[in-house]
Amino acid sequence: MAKIVYSMLTSLDGYIAGPDGDIALPVPEAELHQHFNDMMRRASVVLAGRRMYEMMRFWDSPDRETGDTEVERDFACAWRETPKIVFSTTLREVGPNARLVNGDAGTTVRSLKAETDGLVILGGADLAASLSRAGLVDEFRLYMHPVVLGAGKPYFQPGQSLTLRPLGTESLTQGVTLLRYAPAS
């Protein structure tokens, strides 16, 4: 059975994006980037909502194979190799190694969870909230940067109520602290 992990970079005040929707958090440097590369390589599937998928499509570009740094090229390769399921009612098509679902995310993910083994990475606050309400998120990973955005898109949706139990913390490079939680059962 798959383990679904909602994983995002956040500010200390809990935002994954700034007030304008821009990613106002520091860009991961090589060591932190490698952490995410390793996680992507372990993933069986990536689940994404439209906005998260459109932001990550940057890594589909063939230019990522020859440009930038070695750690970025490695991430691009891992991203392209990992199957993706994109949940959207507005997109009409998705890129390579991705499948578009415009129906009920809960039903799709419930089947995926039963039929898939390993790590399933979940990105995007709205999709995560929907799947969390359905009891389908197994772990929450908050990668907290030592910055305060003051407003923006929160990691947890306003009004979302969860009781969580801590799984551990880890200090990473760039002053980032990984906080891991599971739903309390």
Image: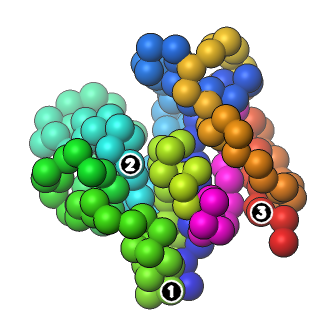
User: On the image, which quarter does residue 8 sit in?
Assistant: top right
* Secondary structure at numbered mark 1: helix
Residue at the image position 56 percent from the left and 85 percent from the top: 1
Residue bearing mark 1? 114
Q: Amino acid at mark 2?
A: Gly
Residue at the image position 55 percent from the left and 61 percent from the top: 131
Residue bearing mark 2? 49
* Secondary structure at numbered mark 3: strand
* Secondary structure at numbered mark 2: strand
Q: Is residue 134 magenta?
A: yes
Q: Which residues are magenta?
A: 132-144
Whole-angstrom CA distance, mark 1 to mark 3, is 18 Å
Q: Amino acid at mark 3?
A: Pro
Q: Could you say where residue 29 lies in the image, as x and y percent from the top left?
A: 51, 28
- Say which label, 1 or 3, has the lower sequence index: 1
Whole-angstrom CA distance, mark 2 to mark 1, is 21 Å
Residue at the image position 41 percent from the left and 59 percent from the top: 47
- Say which label, 3 or 2, has the lower sequence index: 2
Q: Residues within 10 Å of mark 1 (few under 14, many from 20)?
A: few
Asked if disc 1 and disc 3 are in contact, CB closer than 8 Å, the reply is no
User: Quick check: 176 left or right of 38?
Assistant: right
Asked if disc 3 and disc 2 are in contact, CB closer than 8 Å, the reply is no
Whole-angstrom CA distance, mark 3 to mark 2, is 21 Å
Residue at the image position 20 percent from the left and 31 percent from the top: 67
Q: Amino acid at mark 1?
A: Ala
Residue bearing mark 3? 183
